[in-house]
Amino acid sequence: MLVPTPRSLMLIRHGHAENNDKSREDRAKDSHYSTYNCKLTPEGRRQAAILGKWLASKEGYYFDRYFSSPYVRPLETFEIAFPGIKPTIDARLMELRRGMEDILTDKQMRNRLHLKEWKRREAEGPYHFKPLNGESWDDVEIRLRSFYQTLQLECHDKDVVVTGHGKTTAIWEGPIFGNLSPEETIEKYKTDPPKNASVTIYECKNGILVPTLVNFAPWE
């Protein structure tokens, strides 16, 4: 018996955004910094517009359901690429929340963390460590797997668009659909990260979603 599966799944990463131009040092200095509210830059809006034109030019690209992270930058990307369409916003699609790592440099963290906590950070590694007030990559994987169960229930044999973030795209491509280990997922993210305003497409083949287009940025 085949497991319920979308007919196709298009993953879109948001266009270039304000947070992409900010280093850890910049964020630590900005008392008003919020990763949720970061908007697209003019370059990001240009990328999203080109993405929209590319999508409009592709015959056969018709979608039944649209989903987006609630963050500002993927919503702006979606609005530009899919004018006149309102996506279903799902909090499970939000970006990895790094807590104190979003507002402190490593040096500042070392000064604030108990030595045992710092050593635990090093021992657990980037995929499993959960910073104060933040999430681990494991946490994001759990909520994305939950979201995918929703797609299986609501979107069987339908064509779906999901607009999200760099790390969420990496987790879709890594442990969820690519069967990569945590270490392989982190390494792939470092060496070949999802591009801004990029598209990755999975199509159902014999009940399994397989990639047919990966990390393609129409604006390049």
Image (spheres, rainbow, N blue to C red):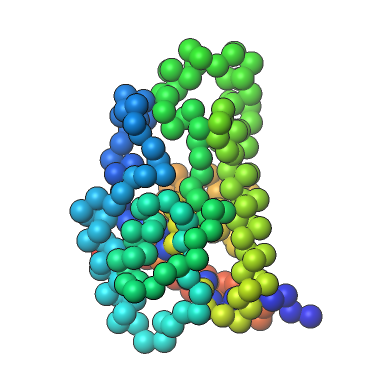
Does residue 20 appear in the picture of this structure? no
Q: Name the residue rendered at 25%, 59% in the picture.
A: 45
Where is residue 214? Give x, y as percent.
44, 65
**Is 172 displayed left or right of 62 in the figure?**
right
Q: Name the residue rendered at 48%, 48% in the picture.
A: 95
The quadrant holding residue 213 is bottom left
Question: In this orientation, which residue lies closer to the viewer: 154 or 10?
Answer: 154
Q: Residue furthest right?
A: 1
Count numbered badges in the picture.
Answer: 0
Check the picture and name the quadrant holding the N terminus. Answer: bottom right
Where is residue 57? Give x, y as percent.
30, 82
**Is 32 displayed left or right of 187 in the figure?**
left
Question: In this orientation, which residue lies closer to the viewer: 128 or 102?
Answer: 102
Relative to 18, is 103 above or below?
Answer: above
Where is residue 119? Give x, y as percent.
61, 20
Q: Name the residue rendered at 62%, 64% in the picture.
A: 148
Relative to 30, is 84 above or below?
Answer: below
